[in-house]
Amino acid sequence: MLQNYQYFLTLAETLNISRAADNLFISHQCLSRYLKTLESECGLRLFERKPNLTLTYAGELLLNALRQVEHIEQDLGKAFDELKNDSSGVISLGMTSGRLRVFLPQLLTMYQRDYPAVFVKATAAPTDVLINQLLENKLDIAIVNTIENFHAKLDYRVILEESFYLVISDSLLKAYFPDTYPDCKAEFAKGVDLRMFSKVPFCTTECGLTSRRMLDSFSRQTGTSFNIVYEGAQSDFLHILSTYDYGASLCLTMYLPNVQHLNSQMPENNRLNVFPISGITERNAVYLVTQKGKYLPQYAKDLISLIYRQCESCSDAQS
């Protein structure tokens, strides 16, 4: 039954014998004979033929079982590869696009020093897509936040508890707090009350995204309306807009090193200020997610350890 099980998996995915045969580089007749033999061995019909090819309940059971076999086979192959050469291989890592841009460059640079022969295959996608890719064994590791449903087959580890920060240029501070600038900077460094910034132009993420949810929640709780002049999907781009005095923006802990990098390229008389926000106790949990029980080679475990250390350095960026 397990011989050539990829034939069944491909047929179950395409639900078309001709297309599946083309994908497998075999003839239509060969695949039809395989299916007939498999159903004979099982003693059950695995596909309904009319009006269209669809899986029966028995076919669904076999599909789920063979997917597990496929995962075991892949894990075993990786384990054997590591035994042959424990310093080379491939790791698939997924993150949301904004975090990937600000977190991955330094991570890859540091990791490649120890593992130059390991290829890190990075994927940028929304959290729900990354979770599905983990379940389908298309990813080894995912870094996500805003988990709504915890899947029983996945292992979730909190790697960072993010705080929220206000990012604002010296020019905007001077324009909106002319009577107290620059002395206000020392006071704001202890924590800002966002209500004092309601007239300041704001660049925010789109509704539903993490920092925007926090801002909207604060707005409802305090009855404060903010002067939002730009909405976008990528937090790191909002920080770039702040360097042009287009508006203040919000920053999560993982993005702090990127703001520091932007500051290093700005003139000293108009740097970005990063202030903690008072009155907000909410923290944003960032998770490292893997499949429960999945075999990970040592070089993957070392990458996870490095991810933890880099998250610690993000927290230190504001201290």
Image (cartoon, rainbow, N blue to C red):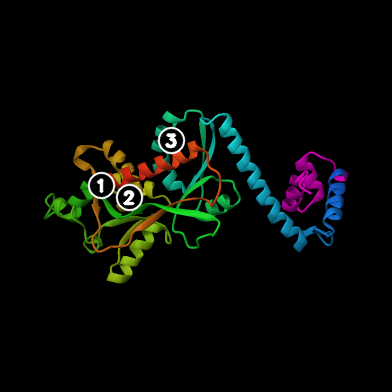
Vertical side of 196 occupied by 99: above or below: above
Q: Position of residue 317 (x, y in %)?
A: 28, 44
Residue at x 47% of width, y 41% of height? 301
Q: Residues within 10 Å of mark 1 (few under 14, many from 20)?
A: some
Which residue type does callout 1 highlight? Gln
Asked if disc 1 and disc 2 are in contact, CB closer than 8 Å, the reply is yes
Q: Residues within 10 Å of mark 2 (few under 14, many from 20)?
A: many
Tell me how far mark 1 sits from mark 2, CA to CA. 8 Å
Which residue type does callout 2 highlight? Thr
Asked whether, in this view, residue 80 is left or right of residue 231, the answer is right
Q: Along the polypeptide, which appears first: circle 3 or circle 1?
A: 3
Helix, strand or loop at disc 1? loop
Which residue type does callout 3 highlight? Leu
Asked if disc 3 and disc 1 are in contact, CB closer than 8 Å, the reply is no
Helix, strand or loop at disc 3? helix
> The magenta stretch spans which residues?
1-29
Tell me how far mark 2 sits from mark 3, CA to CA. 19 Å
- Of residues 217 and 38, the one nearer the viewer is 38
Vertical side of 60 occupied by 111: above or below: above
Q: Position of residue 267 (x, y in %)?
A: 23, 37
Reading the image, the residue beneath label 3 is 108
Reading the image, the residue beneath label 1 is 318
- Of residues 87 and 20, the one nearer the viewer is 87
Reading the image, the residue beneath label 2 is 253
Is residue 161 rendered magenta in the image?
Answer: no
Q: How many marks?
A: 3
Q: Is residue 244 visible?
A: no
Q: Residues within 10 Å of mark 3 (few under 14, many from 20)?
A: some
Residue at x 68% of width, y 56% of height? 64
